[in-house]
Image (cartoon, coloured by chain):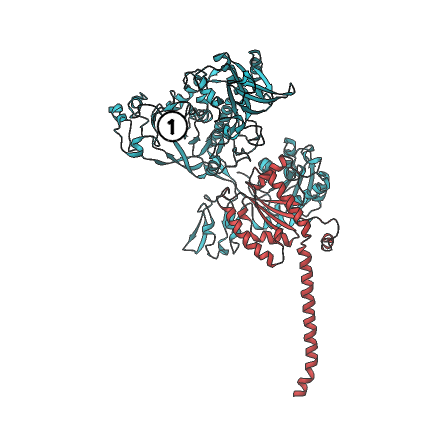
Amino acid sequence: MSTSSKNGDGEIRIGFYVCQCGHNIGAVVDCPAVAEYASKLPGVVLSRHYKYMCSDPGQELIQQDIREHKLTRVVVASCSPLLHEHTFRGAVERGGLNPFYFQMVNIREHNSWVHADGAAATAKAKALARAAIERVRFHRPLETTRVPINPDVLVVGGGIAGIHAALTLANAGKKVTLVEREPSIGGHMAKFDKTFPTLDCAACILTPKMSAVRAHENITLWTYSEVVKVEGYVGNYTVTVRRKPRYVHEDLCVGCQECITACVYKDARFPDEFNVGLSKRKPVYLPFPQAVPQAVVIDPERCLQVKTGKCKKSCLEACADRKAIDFSMKEQLIEIKVGTMILATGFRLFDATRIPQYGYGLYPNVVTSLELERLVNSSGPTGGEIILRDGSKPQTAGFILCVGSRDVKTNRWCSRTCCMHSMKLAQLFKEHTGADVTIFYMDIRAPGKGCEEFYDKSLREGIRFVRGRVAEVTDWALAPEEEGKLVIRVEDTLAGFVRRIPVDMIVLAVGMEPNADSQDVRRLFNLSCSTEGWFLEKHPKLAPVNTFTDGVFIAGCCQGPKDIPDSIAQAGAAAAEALALIDKGYIEQEPNTAYIVEADCSGCKSCVPLCPYTAISFDEATRKARINEALCKGCGTCVASCPSGSIRQHLFEDDQIFNEIAGVMAS
Amino acid sequence: MDRMSDEKSGAVGWEPRIAAFFCNWCTYTAADLAGVSRLKYEPNIRVIRLMCSGRVDPQFIVEAFARGADGVLIGGCHPGDCHYVEGNYKTLRRFEMLKRMLSDLGIEEPRLRLEWISASEGEKVRTVVNDMVARLRQLGPLDLPGRFKAWDQEMADLAHEIQQQEAAAAATAQPEVTHAS
């Protein structure tokens, strides 16, 4: 920061600008009247209203005025400071003033957009403007501080978004630690058979990326691990990761699976998570054929040795001198230091039993879309055969859309992928079985590239579409052709009457939900959540992968439902945002730290325990409190508590706030 | 000041005025969201942005009342969600203490309000502001500046009275003194 503080000292010459923001402010607030009002306030030498203050000419206007009218303070009444404070500080600085001789007034988000009464909104704008004008007199020149950034990155979640972000960063030469909760990376995408709308094989496009993660020299992959603690701040985070014991050394296991054959459990008898419970596995298992790392894992809940310590450990014998299996493994807590973090923790699927009228869990041939995905997959439980529970082939099938989406009783949002996902599955269903397939929908949403064409293709291939939200699925036959079938009761809203349609198999297109522990994860990383529970981006348009915590980025479905291309695009964006921070080499910190006026400090120590960052210490020699500004985050809690008023806060000084209060209350 | 005297007499056209202290990370952002979502609420609120609700010095609140606020609203992150770990707990402690003090001063409880509003709760900003404005309308003006003046007048009258009494006492006591000598 090169600007000296010499300008701005001495005489107070305030320039006031009110932005019309096109009609956004101008249509509600009488901007010329606000400018007129401000021009009469003490210290104001210039007061203008302008169409778009944030535009280049608007900023140029400020710079020019600073030079021509020798302004020493600038106030802009426009949108939220969270949006454009940075912009205007830049303009003030280019005009030759210290950028902190600036105050912003929010008359858009907090005024014109929320109030309909023009007169009241104008009065409010005047009051807020006055507050800023009274406050800015007491501003002091400040310098931003620079702290170095640790170039290492943590990526949480090894689905397609996390994988892509990790690879992008690693390819740019950054050291990445990828932490995944499950024993293998791959996430939901690894369970899919084909991907819409191109119908390319999910494994064929995902597996190479998974292998690349494993092989990349810049990526440390920790599967079966979870982040348990996050400390620090942007550029300098300390993260504690819990590595659950796998009881298998990943580097020694070659994935030969001889231990699985040798396991004392002769039959696989535990539900296989990867096949969503449609097949069984043993206590020692490989998550799925293409798993990365290609290492077996021992389920501590199922393994006799882990549970009771009484097993003949035939797996150990089978592993022989490879010595990959190790029952002495313990949970590890590892601390790593990173500068930035990307969260790609994904989603969970809606639990279809929450809508009992669709009969999931009651009728065995009602399945979820993910279950069908496993059934059509050649590495799935049936080897790619779509069969009913009795082993026979279905002749007819019905897909019910919006199960747990667009429904005020469950989730109000559209899960965005289910229309396309269901049409893809319907095409595969038809291809595999030749069955008659009907899709029950409310609206078909196919807005992506190639998606509308895919919808056309579905129609051409003879998939039937019935518009209407399904009321009920029942096995109560009312006609001979309904015997032994599942009957879908639906109001066909195009035909205009209620229909009963018997089918052999029903597929529920379950929607996406935030993970069950999303609130815990959010707290861990100090993020905000939308009302629904998705991680909140800093700005819905301008900062879609940033969060309110600097240095923490989000990508993929943890931010909201999206398909694979969108997840990957976000992952790339998050990686680029992290790179932009890292390659700058330092972080500019807002100079809003607290400081002590030593002469006034009585040494009462009441501030010391208040600081959550232990930035305040007590100097026994001087009997005064001392603040380490490098540790201070600028919350101001100590400032408010100091009985002698000896702690102050840059940018939020008492005299500034008192004058702001006087200003808002003056009119 | 004309307005103040209007308020004191409860004249028509009186509108409650609320000074609000919102934390940068949750409640201020929620108010921004209310704006972006074009939620309409009462225009009686004036927001002062602070980094954390923990920065709210009780003196700010007293000052706002003294300057004519009819109500003061503090908005912070939900417990456990504070951007600065636990600043909002400190706010809560101070709030509870200050509430007692204010009630001793005759400032009714609904005039000071603390709300946890997260960044996604734009709707809550609207309901809280509207609700608070409605309650303040019921309570009527606080008009602390007016009351200060009335109290000052009372004190001045009292002082004047005492002075007069003392003078009168002195006048009647005078002969006694001479008599005694």
Image quarter (top left, top right, bottom left or bottom right) of the C terminus of chain B: bottom right
Shade representing chain A: cyan
Q: Which residue is mark 1?
A: A183
Residue at the limit of the structure toward the right, as seen here:
B12
- Give the image quarter of residue A98: top right
Q: Is residue A453 above or below residue A5?
A: above
Indicate the position of residue A372 as horizontal and vertical percent values.
47, 20
Q: Which is nearer the eye, B70 or A575?
A: B70
Q: Is residue A492 above or below residue B175?
A: above
Indicate the position of residue A436 as horizontal and vertical percent values.
53, 14
Q: Which is nearer the eye, A583 or A227?
A: A227
Kind of residue at badge 1: Pro
CA neighbours of label 1 inside 10 A, class few (<14), some (14 to 19), many (20+): many
Q: Is residue A225 left or right of residue A69?
A: left
Indicate the position of residue A425 as horizontal and vertical percent values.
50, 18
Numbered marks: total: 1
Q: Is residue A9 left or right of residue A314?
A: right
Shade representing chain B: red
| Circle 1 chain | A
- Give the image quarter of residue A248: top left
Indicate the position of residue A11 as horizontal and vertical percent values.
63, 47
Q: Residue at x 63, y 44 (%)?
A: B129
Q: Which is nearer the eye, A142 or A388?
A: A388
| Secondary structure beneath label 1 | loop
